[in-house]
Amino acid sequence: LVEWNDTATDHPQDLCVHRLIEAQAERTPDAVAVVLPSTEGGPDARLTYGELNRRANQLAHHLRKRGVGPETVVGICVERSLEMIVGVLGVLKAGGAYLPLDPLYPPERLAYMLDDAGVAILLTDSNTLPRLPIRMEATRDEATEATRGEASEAPRDEATEATRDEAPGAEASLATRPSDLITQPSALRPQPSDLVTLNLDDWTPFADEPDTNPEVPVSPTNLAYLIYTSGSTGQSKGVMIEHRSLVNAYRGWEASYRLRSVRTHLQMANFAFDVFSGDLVRALCSGGRLVLCPREWLLDPERLYGLMRREGVECAEFVPAVLRHLIQYLDETGERLDFMRLLICGSDSWYVSEYRQFLRFCGPETRLINSFGLTEATIDSCFFEGSAMDLSGEQVVPIGRPFANVRLYILDDHLQPVPVGVPGELFIGGLGVARGYHNRPKLTEEKFIPDPFSDDPNARLYRTGDLARYLPDGNIEFLGRLDYQVKVRGYRIELGEIEATLGRHPAVREAAVVALEVAPGDKRLAAYIVPAGETVPTAGELRRFLQERLPDYMVPSAYVVMEALPLTPNGKVDRQALPEPEWSRRQLAGEYVAPRTPVEEVLAGIWSQVLGVEEVGVHDNFFELGGHSLLATQLVSRVREAFEIELPLRHVFECPTVATLAERIEIIRRTEAGVQAPPIRPVPRDREIPLSFAQQRLWFLDQLAPNSPLYNIPDAVRITGPLDVGVLERSLNEIVRRHEVLRTTFAAVEGRPIQVIAPELHLPLPVVDLRSLPKARREAEALRLATEEAQRPFDLARGPLIRALLLRLDEEEHIALLTVHHTVSDGWSTGVFMGEIAALYEAFAAGKPSPLPELPIQYADFAVWQREWLQGEVLERQLAYWKEQLAGLPPILELPTDRPRPAFQTFRGDYQTFTLPEEL
């Protein structure tokens, strides 16, 4: 144990973080330091090391004049931008400590952090400023003069204020420009104090400042940053990190990760989390290029990978949830990460089986690393890498061994080391341990204890609350938490903070919150509520209450109302006895409204698949059904595939219901390729109905090769349990009645095909009973019948173009065969069909009427709309576009087969199953 903690490394102890970046700027002033990719097709924004250093110097000199110096906390609340990096470096150069704030945080949370940290100056931008929990008042020039001078000589109470006329069109003097405002906190601020806001996207106030490095008496023991983490008592707590701890973290990464050989770093972490600071110092202290990933690309695997490939990213730190999505995309597209040197995954647990899977997408020079750390111990404390693990795939990846000047101890209740393999609480010591919690002396004393294993009387250990054990090879295995802190999609959450916030709702007497893994890699929060009186709060009401006070990732997905919370014998909430929440729309207060249009039907089917719920109404909120940002990426991917449109991820957040998203999709489809399309409207049925272009293509192919099963769409569903055949047949016929296209055949008038819609059509459901066969033969006979049914051709003129067959294998085991022709259905329609069957069968079996509304638009209406719109200039533009896109494609795809291509297409095929060796 002593040997495994022998991590002492000598490096200069008198440096601050910004000095390391200044030294790099002096060495390579013309090298690119920071890149912000354009999301709109324009040029990327860039800063060289020289430009970054000069701009940060100008900001630092200005901050010095406003009283910023050692131990001064300066808030930074900006969108992801180059100014974000300039702001951080400028604050450090002025001697201050930065407090990173996410502009998307609820106003109440931002207000608490600003007040608790005692922030007097806030760096922001023009887009963020209106959303901040402050009201603005203009200053007179004396406000600037009053704050000139050294930090210790800048009395904040001497600023003279004058109320600004806030009427529309009011003129502002030079003193009231956006970059030079004194603001007053809103009513949300518990203890009001003057707050100066400086807009970083208006450089006018800083342009005349010197661009030389300021000389500031800041030492390694001064504060570098203050970051707030979730708190168990209901309020987040600020963690104080000193320069020496951040410099030591960099030195550890530099040595263990060999950073000097890494050129390009990807920055993905939220600005308000400490991993952001790690991304920044790893890149800029080592001379690398820091690429800021746009927020909207982070959860879009296609765009994220495109950015990584284009920029040649060699180092990136992911949370497991995001990396899983990226790996899934790589698996589907055949792409790889072989251009990377450091693929780091941290902030949450992941499994050995995933480690082995992820390795397959790496190159021989790629190091796959599991990092582990806490905000209270300066970002990362230890790391693991290794392809040869003697561990089962179900185990979590070890958290490894400590970085330089970090010591890890696994102790029992008496603070004594436990033997190898024995679980105990993990304690962290060394230079990375934080100063403590801001304004929380009792909590600091409780969590930061004297280090009994150090000769330094000032050394301390941080009590993590994590359960861990040593493996025989010296690596550490994380086993879970000793308290109610959890990690959800990489976010550290104190469940007590959510419970305390729920307890502030007037209709809530008691609350408990747990994190549940509903599927591998999909962890969600569930809240259990005991009402305070007869009025029971709805899930939507509670969700809105929390959204006003907590970040989105801390808002539970499910809410369960209980008469009382179960208790253990000692009177604590028995979390193991809490019932499993119902991840369905039944928890929602709104009435179910079924899909009304084809687009809504397809969307509801996609939502059902992504969320794992059986029934989705058009007014149901995606996020209230358990959706979150990562599931939203799956939703967008499937919507893009289903509708062949480009749907930005933000549209899911802006339009979180089926109805609103369907409207947005219709708008996108009408305006795609710059062509404004009219809406689809019902047309009279007493006219000739043309075929859609897709139908006409299939009809033409059928004329060339009649009686062919090539365009049959067969489906088979195994039904286990009691089955009412009559109810199933009634459900099938209700679908045929609802959808005209299933009652459609095709006739030729003067050589032109038209649609013929039968007013009525009864679809029989014949039953083939296989129970008389031996059990061993039933499956084989079912397969033979299914194949025969799938290969039986349709007559497009006579119809019907849909048929069903039920195979009875046993009393409570059936296989339903459904076959339709491609002229009246497609793959996505099959999903809609199955969803409607389930809803109708459930209703009819219970003696209820159909829950599905009548459809205002039918496929025939679409066919007429398409024919009337796609003609003339519109058609020419569409054809020209696709001809350009498809130019240069080979007329025939020549595959390297071991036999000659037949003279005529036969459509014969087969499949062969084989296993690829693991080394591939």
Image: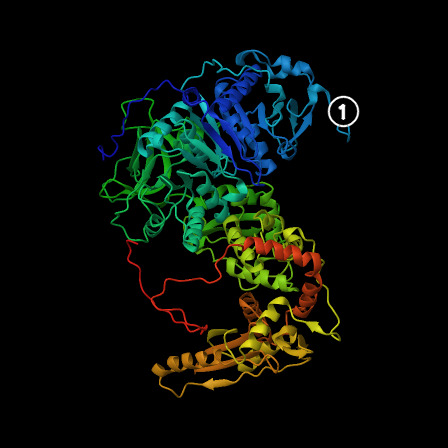
User: Image quadrant of residue 119?
Assistant: top right
Residues 609 and 761: in front is 761
x, y percent for residue 702? 56, 76
Amino acid marked by disc 1: Glu
The residue that label 1 is drawn on is 171
Residues 135 and 253: in front is 253
| SS for callout 1 | loop
Q: Residue at x 29, y 39 (%)?
A: 412
What is the residue that sits farthest to the bottom in this orientation? 772
For residue 720, say whether it is visible: no
Side of 229 where 346 appears, left or right: left
x, y percent for residue 544? 61, 47
Residues 800 and 445: in front is 800
Vertical side of 17 occupied by 518: above or below: below
Vertical side of 877 occupied by 180: above or below: above
For residue 241, say whether it is visible: yes
x, y percent for residue 736? 62, 76
Q: Quadrant of the N terminus?
A: top left
Residues 698 and 649: in front is 698
- How is the rendered protein coloured? rainbow
